[in-house]
Image: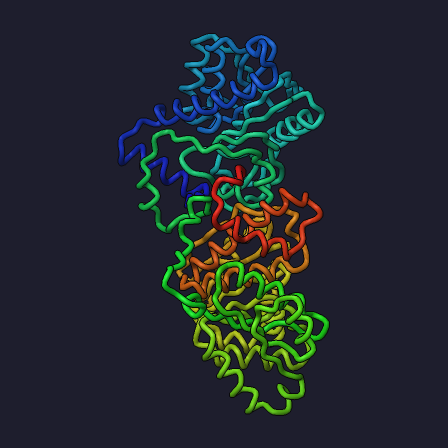
Amino acid sequence: MRYLLTGKEAQAIDQYTMEQMGVPSLVLMERAALEVARAAEREAKGLNGENPLSQVRIRAVCGTGNNGADGVAAARILFLKGYNAGALILGDPGEGSKQFQKQLQIARSFGMPVYQVGEEQPLKLKAELVIDAIFGVGLSREVGGMFADWVRRINEERAAGKIRRVIAVDLPSGIHGGSGQVMGTAVKADVTVTFGWEKRGSVLYPGRDYAGQVETADIGFSPAAVNLLEEIPACAYGPEDLARIPERKAYSNKGSFGRVLIVAGSANMCGAAFLCALGAYRMGAGLVKVLTVEENRQPLLQLLPEVILETYTESQLMEGREEFRQMIDAQCQWADVVILGPGLGSKEYVEYLVEDILTAACTPVVVDADGLNAIAAHPYLTSYFTENLIITPHLGEMSRLTGEPIAQMKQDTAAWAKSYALRYGLTCVLKDAATVVASRDGEIYINTSGNSAMAKAGSGDVLAGVIGGLLALGMEEKESARLGVYLHGRAGDLAAARSGPHGLLARELADGLTKAAFNRGELKRD
């Protein structure tokens, strides 16, 4: 597990390290600059391996804050190694931070070229490699004026091939450190060298698209510093977290690994039930039962003979309400986990089915797809929400649940997921290109596995099954949601590597879960 900090959290750790631990700011800055310089030197050698010292021009484009100071220091280190390196200063150095002014003084003392750029000066940037040090993680307003002009110039020359590599210091300039949003305009980097911990802004979209390859450098922060923050920071999982999967004991039987009841599927929609059940079985559940309409009996038995089936008709549900409720009670008592929603459709009876399940289930319940749509259409159903509930909406479903536009939620998906989880005391899995899991205690997980090949029908059904399978193995709701999302994305990465970016099918996600869960060495991108 690794932490992902907001800009404010990163600044708080900076202050703690300097004020409480006694590490001078210039020491931290020098170590940060060394890491940026190492990355720049590596990239320069990649551009011209024979003679990068004279053939590759390096310019640090710097603001006048501490991020700019890092850039000036990195350029100075490269200059002293013999590189054709210098710094362009945007704004008035006299109004810069103390650290910036100190670094500028040091650079000039060594004779490094420094170019001050004003509002009226033409935009001139002759460099093959640019160090972006205009703004850091503390940016809270839109980029404007000459700063926006320079950001656009960097991007234009990079797109035209004049600038061949861009290295961002801590975070690409113009990206919000907490939400990943573009603050008006932002630098498109090839590499981002960040310090201490990754930043949320480089993990959430669109910031992830701007950050390029993210490298986290140790510059001397205490690992314990994150424990002193007001809230536990967001986190992400990697291959090391595969150890969280419960072991399968030798002395056991199918009942030892949990019973999953999947309430899914409608006429002509048995695929959702199949994919969800397959995901639960592949994740290790011992018994999986699908409660579905009678029309799905034959195709489901052909697709997945391992599944247990319980069927009903629409007339049974609507006309024999008391008998149907008794049947639901019996099914929920059998189950250790209930998954509700995939492929249920939107007929009138779905409202009553969702209500019956939510009132009868005393075990963890995963609500997905049409289960969520039924709740959105009938808000009184939220009165049945309990702390053992996991909801798995995509942005469209979340918009229907909250009544808020998708565009607004995209501005900060983590904040919206957290708000909903805290409001109802449940676990919210808000599915997006970077899926967010918010638990009822307010903690945030941001997923970094997965790829666009997974944007296919049925992918969400598999995810619901994966989470349900982990719950069946005995994991609690927060951990099942986090690990389920990670494994689902990791399976997608493995499958996409085989099938390519376009040919991935949802059932391949389920079939790839075994490798995703137990092969730690196959994926480099983790």
Task: Choose between 52 and 315: the one closer to the eye.
Answer: 315
Q: Residue at x 55, y 39 (%)?
A: 175
- Image: 68 above or below 182: above
Residue 202 visible to the viewer: no
Q: Position of residue 223 (x, y in %)?
A: 33, 39
Would residue 39 appear left or right of 303 to someone viewing this image?
left
Q: Residue at x 54, y 68 (%)?
A: 367
Task: Choose between 123 and 337: the one closer to the eye.
Answer: 337
Q: Residue furthest front?
A: 251
Quadrant in the rendering for residue 473: bottom left
- Image: 254 above or below 444: below
Would residue 36 appear left or right of 502 to someone viewing this image?
left
Task: Choose between 64 and 464: the one closer to the eye.
Answer: 464
Q: Position of residue 237 (x, y in %)?
A: 46, 47
Residue 261 visible to the viewer: yes
Quadrant in the rendering for residue 377: bottom right
Q: Position of residue 513 (x, y in %)?
A: 54, 53
Q: Position of residue 501 (x, y in %)?
A: 68, 44
Count of marks, rendered view:
0
Task: Choose between 91 and 153: the one closer to the eye.
Answer: 153
Q: How is the image coloured?
A: rainbow
